[in-house]
Image (cartoon, rainbow, N blue to C red):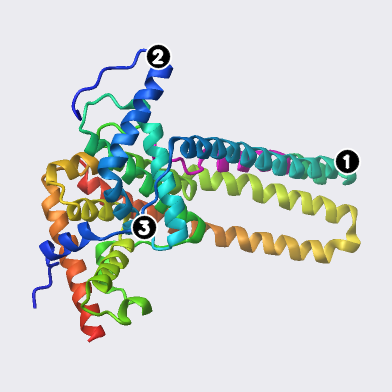
Amino acid sequence: MLGERRKPHSLHESQELGECLNGEAIAIFGHALDRLACAYEADPDTRRDFMQDIHLALWRSFSNFEGRCSLRTWVYRVAHNAAASHVMRQHRMKKRKFVTLDELENLPDREQETADIAADRGKALERISLLIQRLDPLDRQVIVSHLEGLQADVISEITGISAGNIPMKIHRIKNVLGRRFNQGANHGK
Amino acid sequence: MASEFPTNDVKALWQNQKPKEVRMSVDDIRERADRDRERVRRRTVIGSAASYLVIAYFVLMFFVVPNVIGRIGSCVTIVACAYMAYQLHSRRGEALSGPPTGSAGIRAYRAELERQRDFHCGWWLWSRLLIFFPSVLLFIGGFALSYPELAKGLGAIAAVMVGLTILAVPLNRKEARRYQHRIDELDALEK
């Protein structure tokens, strides 16, 4: 069902096919998209708008979907592009700063990061999200895809980073996040 | 203590989280698309109206200032305003959510970074400053020649303009370097 697709013959047919694919994508990847939104936006209200942006981007994109890649790859690409667009917009509007891995390693902890970091699942997840939200958009794409369980070749297709560089990149991000994660956990004890 | 992420635990934690779901019906999406189109149209209309207002002001000034220098200043300021509006329009951020092909994610992100970098350096920066700065000084100079009693205040405005222009150079170049740094990082990773 997710493989090659017939090219639509008319605009109406194209719209119908797009809406059908959109429904299929949301049914299969809806939860993954919700998690992706959490990795990119901390504020719940803004996240809701951002999620709507992703849905809209997906809906629009399916008029151009020709089945040359899997539906999963397509959905993640569109979602990550929409996310990068969202991050850049926030960056411009609010001067929200994202950091490189080197910068993240040397940054002082933010108040909300150091306070009350307990070992329970909710807090750990909250801390992971906070750390991920500070990363450069490309690093975010890589680590979020990795956490979603995608393999290096799929992450390469989504992000455009060479497949050979993906494991190295993931290793480096995990190292930095791990150090920051442990620091926060130790502060919380 | 191992410094790496406890990957399997974190993956399980990540994949089992239950964020609040946001779902849109097809009708919602259509409505939203229409709203977005309307917003862009409104923004274009307001932006254009603001540009026309500034230009109209300097057209008026062209007739108010009774000497040639002031009039030349008005003319060049009109051209400068139109040019700045063009720059803002052509360097504005574009949505990265278009149809993706190949390594579209990284390319679209890189293109956005390049657009932002170019706005802050080279031709885009210098042409902006070189056309706007002298035009405003010419206008102020011409105004001061016609109304010597206002010379002090106009001199202060000119000094502030000079200061802001000088300050704009290092600030813009710093921004451009920051964007270039990100582009270099991407280049190191691209296929």
Between marks 3 and 2 in the image, the one whose residue lies nearer the viewer = 3
Q: Earlier in the sequence, mark 3 or mark 1?
A: 3
In percent of width and height, residue B170 lies at: 49, 60
Q: Chain of mark 3?
A: B
Q: Quadrant of residue B88?
A: top right
Q: Residues within 10 Å of mark 1 (few under 14, many from 20)?
A: few
* Screen quadrant of the N terminus of chain B: bottom left
Q: Position of residue B117 (x, y in %)?
A: 43, 48
Query: Taking B96 as reference, is A95 above or below it?
Result: below
User: Circle 1 is placed at which residue position?
Assistant: B63
Hey, what amino acid is under mark 3? Lys
Q: Is residue A100 magenta?
A: no
Q: For the residue labelled by badge 3, is the local secondary structure a helix, a strand or a loop?
A: loop
In the picture as drawn, the residue positioned furthest to the bottom comes out as A189
**Residue stretch in magenta:** B76-97
Query: In the image, what residue occupies the spot 44% across and 54% down?
Result: A48
- The residue identified by callout 2 is A10
Q: SS at mark 1? A: helix
Mark 3 and mark 2, same subunit?
no
Question: Helix or strand or loop: what does disc 2 sit on?
Answer: loop
Q: Residue at x 21, y 73 (%)?
A: A181
Q: Which residue is mark 3?
A: B20
Give the CA distance from mark 2 to mark 1: 58 Å
Left or right of A34? Residue B164 is right
* Front label number (2 vs 1): 2
Q: Residues within 10 Å of mark 3 (few under 14, many from 20)?
A: few
What is the number of the mark on residue B14?
none
